Image: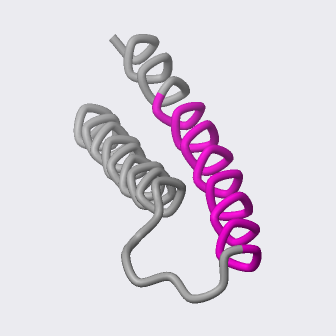
């Protein structure tokens, strides 16, 4: 049972890193677009992607914390 929790935890941790990298890449691209275009009134497509990636990171981090809490509760 503990092995299943560890595998799920590792998967959640990998997804945290993947979504973090995707968010940083979107941030860098949106910054480049903003600098080239000047004043921006609405959010650009890259800024929306950045927001989605960062929200996904927060969700995966929460999932990892929940798995850790379940593992600790099962261990005691």
Point 46% across, 50% down: residue: 49
The colour scheme applied to this rendered structure is one colour
Q: Which of 13 and 56 is in front in this view?
A: 56
Is 17 part of what is drawn in magenta?
Answer: yes
The answer to whether 6 appears left or right of 5 in the picture is right
- Write down the region rendered in magenta: 12-36
The C terminus: image quadrant: top left
Q: In which quarter of the image is the N terminus?
A: top left
Relative to the observer, which residue lies in front, 58 or 8? Answer: 58
Q: Is residue 4 left or right of residue 33?
A: left
Q: Along the line of sight, which residue is nearer the eye, 30 or 70?
A: 30
Residue at 28% x, 45% y: name it.
66
Determine the image quadrant of residue 5. Answer: top left
Compared with 10, 53 (above or below) is below
Q: How many labels does the image show?
A: 0
Q: Where is residue 27 in the image (x, y as percent from the top left)?
A: 64, 63
Question: Where is 68 relative to 2, above or below?
Answer: below
Q: Is residue 58 above or below residue 63?
A: below
- Please name the predominant secondary structure of the magenta segment in the image: helix
**Which of the pair 57/13 is nearer the observer?**
57
Q: Which residue is pictured at 61% across the width and 37% down the height?
A: 18
Image coordinates of residue 45 in percent, x first then y, are 46, 54
Please, which residue is most extreme toward the bottom here?
Answer: 39
Residue sitting at x 63%, y 64%: 30
Q: Horizontal and vertical percent for residue 11? A: 50, 24
Instruction: Say whether residue 70 is magenta.
Output: no
Does 60 appear above or below 46?
above
Left or right of 14, for residue 55:
left
Relative horizontal placement of residue 25, taking residue 58 as reference (left or right): right
Horizontal and vertical percent for residue 12? 46, 32
């Amino acid at each position: 049972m503990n092995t299943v929790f560890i595998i799920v935890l590792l998967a959640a941790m990998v997804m945290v890193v993947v979504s973090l990298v995707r968010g940083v890449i979107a941030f860098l691209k949106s910054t480049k677009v903003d600098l080239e275009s000047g004043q921006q009134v609405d959010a650009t497509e890259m800024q929306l992607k950045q927001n989605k990636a960062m929200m996904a990171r927060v969700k995966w981090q929460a999932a990892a914390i929940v798995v850790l809490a379940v593992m600790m509760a099962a261990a005691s």
